[in-house]
Protein backbone atom coordinates (compact mmCIF):
# COMPACT_ATOMS: atom_id res chain seq x y z
CA UNK A 1 0.00 0.00 0.00
CA UNK A 2 1.25 3.38 -0.79
CA UNK A 3 1.54 5.73 2.19
CA UNK A 4 -1.05 8.37 2.39
CA UNK A 5 0.47 11.72 1.57
CA UNK A 6 -0.84 14.68 3.43
CA UNK A 7 -1.89 17.43 1.20
CA UNK A 8 -1.51 21.02 2.27
CA UNK A 9 -4.49 23.08 1.69
CA UNK A 10 -3.92 25.96 -0.59
CA UNK A 11 -3.63 29.33 0.91
CA UNK A 12 -6.98 30.73 1.77
CA UNK A 13 -8.62 27.29 1.90
CA UNK A 14 -9.87 25.55 4.99
CA UNK A 15 -7.94 22.84 6.70
CA UNK A 16 -9.51 19.40 6.98
CA UNK A 17 -10.88 20.30 10.41
CA UNK A 18 -12.42 23.47 9.04
CA UNK A 19 -10.03 26.00 10.72
CA UNK A 20 -8.15 28.45 8.64
CA UNK A 21 -4.34 28.42 9.24
CA UNK A 22 -2.77 31.72 10.31
CA UNK A 23 -1.35 33.79 7.55
CA UNK A 24 2.39 33.47 7.04
CA UNK A 25 2.81 37.27 7.39
CA UNK A 26 1.17 37.30 10.79
CA UNK A 27 3.54 34.62 12.08
CA UNK A 28 6.52 36.59 10.91
CA UNK A 29 5.16 39.84 12.41
CA UNK A 30 4.60 38.19 15.82
CA UNK A 31 8.11 36.76 15.84
CA UNK A 32 9.63 40.17 15.00
CA UNK A 33 7.66 41.88 17.80
CA UNK A 34 8.89 39.33 20.35
CA UNK A 35 12.46 39.80 19.16
CA UNK A 36 12.05 43.58 19.38
CA UNK A 37 10.75 43.35 22.94
CA UNK A 38 13.67 41.15 23.96
CA UNK A 39 16.17 43.49 22.33
CA UNK A 40 14.53 46.55 23.95
CA UNK A 41 14.59 44.92 27.38
CA UNK A 42 18.25 43.97 27.00
CA UNK A 43 19.04 47.63 26.24
CA UNK A 44 16.84 49.15 28.93
CA UNK A 45 17.50 46.68 31.76
CA UNK A 46 21.07 47.91 32.50
CA UNK A 47 19.83 51.51 32.62
CA UNK A 48 17.02 50.59 34.97
CA UNK A 49 19.47 48.60 37.14
CA UNK A 50 21.83 51.59 37.23
CA UNK A 51 19.02 53.97 38.14
CA UNK A 52 17.87 51.62 40.88
CA UNK A 53 21.35 51.22 42.31
CA UNK A 54 21.94 54.99 42.05
CA UNK A 55 18.69 55.73 43.86
CA UNK A 56 19.56 53.30 46.64
CA UNK A 57 23.07 54.75 46.94
CA UNK A 58 21.74 58.32 47.10
CA UNK A 59 19.19 57.33 49.72
CA UNK A 60 21.88 55.66 51.83
CA UNK A 61 24.15 58.70 51.37
CA UNK A 62 21.36 61.00 52.48
CA UNK A 63 20.67 58.88 55.55
CA UNK A 64 24.42 58.74 56.35
CA UNK A 65 24.75 62.51 55.92
CA UNK A 66 21.86 63.14 58.28
CA UNK A 67 23.34 60.72 60.82
CA UNK A 68 26.79 62.31 60.43
CA UNK A 69 25.29 65.77 60.96
CA UNK A 70 23.62 64.58 64.15
CA UNK A 71 26.87 63.00 65.34
CA UNK A 72 28.73 66.22 64.54
CA UNK A 73 26.20 68.27 66.50
CA UNK A 74 26.56 65.90 69.45
CA UNK A 75 30.37 66.09 69.15
CA UNK A 76 30.34 69.89 69.00
CA UNK A 77 28.02 70.04 71.97
CA UNK A 78 30.37 67.79 73.92
CA UNK A 79 33.46 69.76 72.88
CA UNK A 80 31.99 73.07 73.99
CA UNK A 81 30.58 71.84 77.29
CA UNK A 82 32.54 72.21 80.50
CA UNK A 83 32.30 69.26 82.86
CA UNK A 84 32.81 70.00 86.54
CA UNK A 85 33.39 67.50 89.34
CA UNK A 86 31.95 69.84 91.93
CA UNK A 87 31.40 67.13 94.52
CA UNK A 88 35.02 65.92 94.60
CA UNK A 89 37.30 67.55 97.15
CA UNK A 90 40.85 68.58 96.22
CA UNK A 91 42.36 65.97 98.56
CA UNK A 92 40.06 63.16 97.48
CA UNK A 93 42.25 59.99 97.52
CA UNK A 94 40.78 58.66 94.28
CA UNK A 95 41.36 61.97 92.48
CA UNK A 96 44.93 62.17 93.77
CA UNK A 97 45.61 58.57 92.73
CA UNK A 98 44.07 59.23 89.31
CA UNK A 99 46.37 62.20 88.69
CA UNK A 100 49.42 60.32 89.95
CA UNK A 101 48.83 57.11 87.99
CA UNK A 102 47.35 58.49 84.77
CA UNK A 103 48.50 62.06 84.20
CA UNK A 104 51.89 62.51 85.85
CA UNK A 105 54.31 61.32 83.17
CA UNK A 106 58.04 60.64 83.64
CA UNK A 107 60.46 61.96 81.07
CA UNK A 108 61.91 59.56 78.50
CA UNK A 109 65.27 61.40 78.37
CA UNK A 110 65.54 61.17 74.58
CA UNK A 111 66.21 64.78 73.59
CA UNK A 112 68.80 67.15 75.10
CA UNK A 113 67.49 69.80 77.47
CA UNK A 114 68.15 73.50 76.97
CA UNK A 115 69.95 74.44 80.18
CA UNK A 116 70.63 78.14 79.60
CA UNK A 117 70.04 79.93 82.88
CA UNK A 118 67.21 82.46 82.74
CA UNK A 119 67.22 85.72 84.67
CA UNK A 120 64.39 84.40 86.78
CA UNK A 121 66.43 81.34 87.74
CA UNK A 122 69.27 83.63 88.79
CA UNK A 123 66.96 85.41 91.23
CA UNK A 124 65.56 82.11 92.48
CA UNK A 125 69.09 80.78 92.98
CA UNK A 126 70.02 83.88 94.97
CA UNK A 127 66.86 83.87 97.06
CA UNK A 128 67.22 80.15 97.82
CA UNK A 129 70.93 80.63 98.60
CA UNK A 130 71.93 78.21 95.82
CA UNK A 131 70.04 75.40 97.47
CA UNK A 132 70.57 71.94 96.04
CA UNK A 133 67.92 69.21 95.71
CA UNK A 134 65.13 71.78 95.63
CA UNK A 135 61.51 71.02 94.69
CA UNK A 136 59.44 73.14 92.31
CA UNK A 137 56.10 73.32 90.52
CA UNK A 138 55.92 75.18 87.21
CA UNK A 139 52.78 76.03 85.24
CA UNK A 140 53.10 77.26 81.63
CA UNK A 141 50.16 78.01 79.36
CA UNK A 142 52.08 80.19 76.89
CA UNK A 143 53.08 78.40 73.68
CA UNK A 144 56.82 78.61 73.13
CA UNK A 145 57.54 79.95 76.62
CA UNK A 146 60.95 79.14 78.08
CA UNK A 147 60.93 77.08 81.24
CA UNK A 148 62.47 78.68 84.32
CA UNK A 149 63.39 75.38 85.98
CA UNK A 150 65.58 73.51 83.46
CA UNK A 151 68.84 75.10 84.66
CA UNK A 152 67.90 74.44 88.29
CA UNK A 153 67.47 70.75 87.48
CA UNK A 154 70.69 70.42 85.48
CA UNK A 155 72.96 72.40 87.80
CA UNK A 156 71.44 72.16 91.29
CA UNK A 157 69.70 68.76 91.01
CA UNK A 158 66.22 70.17 91.50
CA UNK A 159 63.14 68.17 90.65
CA UNK A 160 59.45 68.93 90.36
CA UNK A 161 56.25 68.82 88.35
CA UNK A 162 55.90 70.71 85.07
CA UNK A 163 52.28 71.53 84.10
CA UNK A 164 51.77 72.41 80.42
CA UNK A 165 48.57 73.21 78.53
CA UNK A 166 50.08 73.11 75.02
CA UNK A 167 50.26 69.51 73.67
CA UNK A 168 53.42 70.14 71.64
CA UNK A 169 55.22 71.67 74.62
CA UNK A 170 54.10 68.74 76.75
CA UNK A 171 55.51 66.11 74.37
CA UNK A 172 58.76 68.03 73.98
CA UNK A 173 59.15 68.24 77.75
CA UNK A 174 58.31 64.57 78.16
CA UNK A 175 61.07 63.60 75.71
CA UNK A 176 63.66 65.84 77.37
CA UNK A 177 66.52 64.87 79.68
CA UNK A 178 64.98 66.35 82.79
CA UNK A 179 65.58 64.79 86.16
CA UNK A 180 64.16 61.24 86.31
CA UNK A 181 62.23 62.27 89.41
CA UNK A 182 60.48 65.09 87.55
CA UNK A 183 56.95 64.57 86.26
CA UNK A 184 55.25 66.28 83.31
CA UNK A 185 51.52 66.95 83.28
CA UNK A 186 49.37 67.93 80.28
CA UNK A 187 46.63 69.93 81.96
CA UNK A 188 45.62 73.35 83.16
CA UNK A 189 45.22 74.62 86.70
CA UNK A 190 41.70 75.16 87.94
CA UNK A 191 40.73 78.63 89.11
CA UNK A 192 38.62 77.16 91.91
CA UNK A 193 38.65 74.02 94.01
CA UNK A 194 36.85 71.87 91.44
CA UNK A 195 38.30 69.50 88.85
CA UNK A 196 37.10 70.25 85.33
CA UNK A 197 37.29 69.12 81.73
CA UNK A 198 37.13 72.08 79.38
CA UNK A 199 37.46 73.05 75.73
CA UNK A 200 40.94 74.18 74.78
CA UNK A 201 41.78 76.09 71.60
CA UNK A 202 45.31 75.57 70.35
CA UNK A 203 46.84 78.65 68.77
CA UNK A 204 50.19 79.36 67.14
CA UNK A 205 50.45 82.35 69.47
CA UNK A 206 48.35 82.90 72.54
CA UNK A 207 46.32 86.07 72.07
CA UNK A 208 43.59 85.82 74.65
CA UNK A 209 43.20 83.53 77.62
CA UNK A 210 40.24 84.45 79.72
CA UNK A 211 37.22 83.08 81.50
CA UNK A 212 34.61 81.99 79.00
CA UNK A 213 31.09 80.61 79.25
CA UNK A 214 32.31 77.88 81.56
CA UNK A 215 34.01 78.45 84.88
CA UNK A 216 37.47 77.81 83.50
CA UNK A 217 37.33 77.88 79.70
CA UNK A 218 40.32 78.96 77.66
CA UNK A 219 38.75 80.92 74.81
CA UNK A 220 40.62 82.13 71.71
CA UNK A 221 39.90 85.07 69.46
CA UNK A 222 39.31 82.79 66.45
CA UNK A 223 36.62 80.11 66.81
CA UNK A 224 37.80 78.35 63.61
CA UNK A 225 40.95 77.09 65.36
CA UNK A 226 41.11 73.40 66.34
CA UNK A 227 39.54 72.49 69.66
CA UNK A 228 40.57 69.74 72.05
CA UNK A 229 39.62 68.66 75.56
CA UNK A 230 41.79 69.48 78.53
CA UNK A 231 41.68 68.49 82.18
CA UNK A 232 41.97 71.24 84.79
CA UNK A 233 43.08 70.16 88.26
CA UNK A 234 43.44 72.20 91.44
CA UNK A 235 47.09 72.90 92.17
CA UNK A 236 46.74 71.33 95.60
CA UNK A 237 45.55 68.04 94.03
CA UNK A 238 48.57 68.00 91.70
CA UNK A 239 50.98 68.64 94.58
CA UNK A 240 49.43 65.83 96.61
CA UNK A 241 49.76 63.51 93.60
CA UNK A 242 53.44 64.46 93.41
CA UNK A 243 53.86 64.00 97.18
CA UNK A 244 55.09 67.57 97.61
CA UNK A 245 53.38 69.93 100.03
CA UNK A 246 56.56 71.96 100.56
CA UNK A 247 57.94 73.82 97.53
CA UNK A 248 61.11 75.79 97.16
CA UNK A 249 59.77 77.48 94.05
CA UNK A 250 56.38 77.91 92.36
CA UNK A 251 56.24 79.53 88.90
CA UNK A 252 52.92 80.52 87.30
CA UNK A 253 53.48 81.66 83.72
CA UNK A 254 50.05 82.20 82.22
CA UNK A 255 49.40 85.57 80.55
CA UNK A 256 45.93 87.08 80.89
CA UNK A 257 44.86 84.20 83.13
CA UNK A 258 43.64 84.87 86.67
CA UNK A 259 46.61 83.25 88.41
CA UNK A 260 45.53 85.09 91.52
CA UNK A 261 42.52 82.78 91.54
CA UNK A 262 44.83 79.77 91.19
CA UNK A 263 46.64 80.91 94.32
CA UNK A 264 43.30 81.33 96.09
CA UNK A 265 42.71 77.58 95.79
CA UNK A 266 45.83 76.71 97.82
CA UNK A 267 45.29 75.77 101.48
CA UNK A 268 48.05 78.00 102.84
CA UNK A 269 47.92 76.36 106.26
CA UNK A 270 49.10 73.10 104.62
CA UNK A 271 51.25 74.20 101.67
CA UNK A 272 54.60 75.95 102.17
CA UNK A 273 56.22 77.81 99.24
CA UNK A 274 59.52 79.65 99.68
CA UNK A 275 59.76 81.57 96.38
CA UNK A 276 56.79 82.34 94.16
CA UNK A 277 56.73 83.99 90.74
CA UNK A 278 53.61 85.01 88.87
CA UNK A 279 52.96 86.76 85.57
CA UNK A 280 50.98 89.92 86.25
CA UNK A 281 50.20 91.84 83.08
CA UNK A 282 49.72 95.57 82.79
CA UNK A 283 46.05 95.31 81.78
CA UNK A 284 45.16 94.84 85.46
CA UNK A 285 43.89 98.00 87.06
CA UNK A 286 45.78 99.78 89.80
CA UNK A 287 43.13 98.71 92.27
CA UNK A 288 43.46 95.05 91.24
CA UNK A 289 47.24 95.23 91.49
CA UNK A 290 47.14 96.82 94.96
CA UNK A 291 44.58 94.29 96.15
CA UNK A 292 46.70 91.38 94.92
CA UNK A 293 49.86 92.63 96.61
CA UNK A 294 47.96 93.15 99.87
CA UNK A 295 46.60 89.62 99.63
CA UNK A 296 50.10 88.22 99.14
CA UNK A 297 51.32 90.27 102.10
CA UNK A 298 48.58 88.74 104.23
CA UNK A 299 50.08 85.38 103.30
CA UNK A 300 53.52 86.57 104.47
CA UNK A 301 54.90 87.17 100.97
CA UNK A 302 56.95 90.19 99.99
CA UNK A 303 57.39 91.40 96.42
CA UNK A 304 61.17 91.43 95.94
CA UNK A 305 61.63 91.76 92.19
CA UNK A 306 59.88 92.40 88.87
CA UNK A 307 61.52 90.77 85.86
CA UNK A 308 61.88 92.26 82.39
CA UNK A 309 59.51 89.57 81.10
CA UNK A 310 56.67 90.81 83.31
CA UNK A 311 56.82 88.35 86.20
CA UNK A 312 56.67 89.27 89.86
CA UNK A 313 58.83 87.34 92.31
CA UNK A 314 57.65 87.00 95.91
CA UNK A 315 59.62 85.72 98.87
CA UNK A 316 58.04 84.08 101.88
CA UNK A 317 58.96 85.96 105.06
CA UNK A 318 57.73 84.85 108.47
CA UNK A 319 58.58 88.28 109.90
CA UNK A 320 55.93 90.04 107.82
CA UNK A 321 52.99 91.32 109.81
CA UNK A 322 49.61 89.86 109.01
Image (cartoon, rainbow, N blue to C red):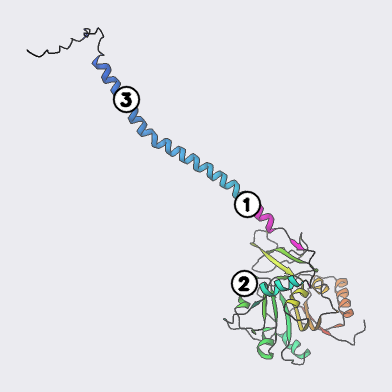
Please report whichever mark, 2 or 3, sits nearer to the chain's N-terminal start.
Answer: 3
Query: Which residue appears farthest toward the left when viewing the image?
Result: 1
Which badge, 1 or 2, is on the more N-terminal residue? 1
Residue at image location 62% in from the left, 52% down from the top = 71
Mark sitting earlier along the chain (3/1): 3
302 horizontally vs 132: left or right = right
Which quadrant is the C terminus positioned in? bottom right
What separation in Å lies between label 2 and label 3 (alpha carbons)?
Answer: 75 Å
Task: Calculate the distance from the C-alpha at mark 3 to the C-alpha at mark 1.
Answer: 54 Å
Pick whichever, 175 or 145, lies toward us.
175
Residue 190, horizontal then vertical, whole percent: 76, 69
Question: Do residues under tags 1 and 2 come within 8 Å of each other at their CB atoms?
Answer: no
Q: Is residue 83 magenta?
A: yes
Where residue 36 appears, as percent x and y from the top left, is: 32, 27
Q: Is residue 41 left or right of residue 179?
A: left
Residue 141 visible in rendering: no
| Number of marks | 3
Q: Neighbour class for label 1 at 10 Å: few (<14), some, many (≥20)?
A: few
Which span is picked out in magenta?
72-91
Badge 2 is on which residue? 168
* Residue 88 position (above or below residue 183): above
Q: Position of residue 299 (x, y in %)?
A: 87, 80
The residue under the point 71% across, 73% down is: 97
Which disc, if any, is residue 34?
3
Q: Nearer the viewer, residue 52 or 94?
A: 94
Q: Which mark is residue 71?
A: 1
Q: Nearer the viewer, mark 1 or mark 2?
A: 1
Amino acid sequence: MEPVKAKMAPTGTSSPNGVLPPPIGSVMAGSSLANYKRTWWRGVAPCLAFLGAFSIAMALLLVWSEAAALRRQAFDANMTRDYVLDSVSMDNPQLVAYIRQVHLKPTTRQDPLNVSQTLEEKYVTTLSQSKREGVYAEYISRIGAISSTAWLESNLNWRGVLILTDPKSFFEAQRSTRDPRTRVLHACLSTDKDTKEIKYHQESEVQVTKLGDGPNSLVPSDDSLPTTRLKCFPLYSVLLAYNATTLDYLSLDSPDAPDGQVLDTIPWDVIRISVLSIRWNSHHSETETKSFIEKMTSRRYKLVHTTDTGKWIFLYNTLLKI
